[in-house]
Every structure is written in C-alpha cells, then in structure tokens.
Image (cartoon, rainbow, N blue to C red):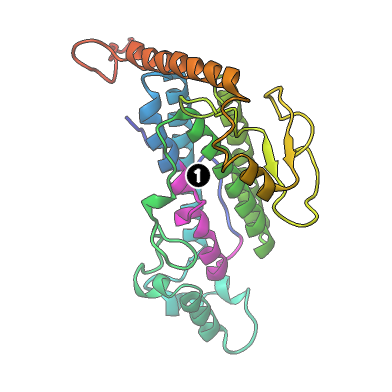
Amino acid sequence: MFHHVKDLQFNARVSRPDPRFANLLLEQFGGENGELAAAMQYFTQAFGAKMPHPDKYDMLMDIATEEFSHLEIVGATIQMLLKGVNGELKNAADSSEIMQVLNGKAAKEDIIHEAVFANPQFGIITGGGVTPRNSQGIPWCASYIHSNGDLTVDLRSNLASESRAKLVYEHLMKFTDDPYIHETLSFLMTREVAHYKMFEAALNDIENNFPPGVLAADPRFTQQFYNLSDGTVRGPWNEGEMPGLGKEWVYISDPISQVSESKGHSDMAGEFAKELKQTEKLNKEMSKLKSEEVKKAEPEGVAQWSDYKPLEN
C-alpha cells in the first residue's frame, strides 16, 4: 500500500521557464535511464525476491518507492520549466517573468517558437504537461526494464542502471545555468550513487553470488584470453590471477592453432577430467541448495503475501 505525501523529497525550484531544458530533462522522466524505468525495474524485481530473499525484497521496494519520488521531482521540475507553455502560452509570453530572460522585439514569438520546437508535443498534444516520453518524444517502453529472476543478475543490472542514470544527470547539468536546477540534479545524481552502494552491499551479502544462476562455469573454457587482434594489450584482464577465483589467466597467443589442435575445444576433457568431475558435483549441490532455498521460503497451504497486524492505539 502506497501513501502519497504531497511534499517532495527534495525542494525542487527553478529560476525561470526554460522549455528547451525541460525537453532535455524528459530523458530522466520517460527515458531509458530515467526514474520511471528505475522504479519499475526495482518494483518488478522485488516480486521474485520476496520468498527466497525477504530482506532484499524490502530493500528493492524501498528503493523503487524512492525512485517514484524522484520521478515526481523530475516531473515537477519539468512542469515549472514549462510555465507559460500551456493553453495561455501567448498571454504568458507577454509576462515579465518570461520577458526578462529574453531580449529584442520578437520576445513573444521567440518564446512560442522555443517552446513548440523544443518538443512539439508540449504545445500540440500535452498542452504543456509532462508525459512518460524521452527527450525525442519516444514513449516509455517496458523493454527498458531488466528483470531476470535471479537476484544476483538483477542486482548487477541495477549497478549498471544507477551508473548510467548518474552519468545522465551529470551531462544534464552542462545544459543549464539555473542554480536551483543544479541543486535538484545534484541531489538526484547523488542518490544514484547511494543506491549503487546499497545494491553493491546487497549483492555481497548473498552467498555463492558468482557465477549467476545454478551451473558452475566449465573449467575447460574459463581462463583463456584469446589474442584476436594485432598488438593486443596485456593487463589484469588477460595476465596474472583472475579476480576472486584463485586461477591464472591463460593467454592464447595463437587462437587459430589452439582451436585446430584442440579440435574446436572438443579434445580437452582428459586434461580437465578431475575439474570436470568437481564441477558436476558442484552443479548438483548448487541445484539442491537453490531448490531448497526457494521451497523453504514458500509457505505451505494457502499463500498469503502480507501478514496483517492490528494497529496499536
């Protein structure tokens, strides 16, 4: 159950109307990396986490709810930036509030032109309102959401989502000199950083979180780095110890010969016979563990999502 508090989480303010920046800011309202996408992504992911990871369900729902509040901040800011772009656009163009940011005798025509051509939908379809579209007018799409049913995969997707959103806010700051908007964008950008660390902590709190899923990686194909271009640069991604696995990278300097000698990697079982048996055993153990984890979390008999408790006087 949601309860809407009318006050914004952050006191969004703008110094003056700016339809062009309002259009850019739509990217964080209905865009691929925007607040609506984040809210729906975490909201969707939470359902699958409810039974096996109730603590992570709580976190995802809380962050999703905060993202909805950020959507409200972005929408309110856009609406304030569009002041005068509603049905009274022509009269508003004469008002001192708008005129003071323009110069020249064509001020009225300029503000109308600016508003309409920043995004024609402002004047033609939405009447100066905000709709879930990006800065190019493309409607919000559910394909923006990444929810894979494996919490470790979902949390890694969320780390990427928060990173992209942080970068978009950073870029947006370059296109406005309004100090109030900078304050708002700085708040929203910083909350992306906070959410990133929350998801990172949640991922680290899950045992056996790598590799994702149930099946372990095939030991025959895990360590190789193939030299597939002239002058391949060496670094920690192809030499030394593999991060967190206690194995060494195997640098294949001549992939063509290696593939030919191994008959397309099909003639490697003998070399890795012991590891393959260990992997098969691990797969069975992890399959049983994951299955028991889910079954244990699911209640017997009638399923009930909420445990209602009487209100205290």
Q: Quadrant of the C terminus?
A: top left
Rendered residue at 55%/64% (across/down): 24
Does 182 sit left or right of 135 as displayed? right
* For residue 180, above or below residue 247: below
Give whichever of 251, 93 is nearer the camera. Answer: 251
- The magenta region covers 15-38
Predominant SS along the magenta part: helix
Rendered residue at 24%/18% (across/down): 304
Q: Quadrant of the N terminus?
A: top left
Does 25 sit left or right of 176 as displayed? left
Element type where label 1 sits in the image: helix
Q: Which residue is mark 1?
A: 70
* For residue 15, above or below residue 97: above
* Residue 234 spot, x, y in % from top left: 81, 44
Rendered residue at 38%/55% (across/down): 141
Task: Specify the amino acid type for callout 1.
Answer: His
* Residue 209 spot, x, y in % from top left: 54, 24
Give whichever of 30, 287 is nearer the camera. Answer: 287
* Residue 134 spot, x, y in % from top left: 46, 61
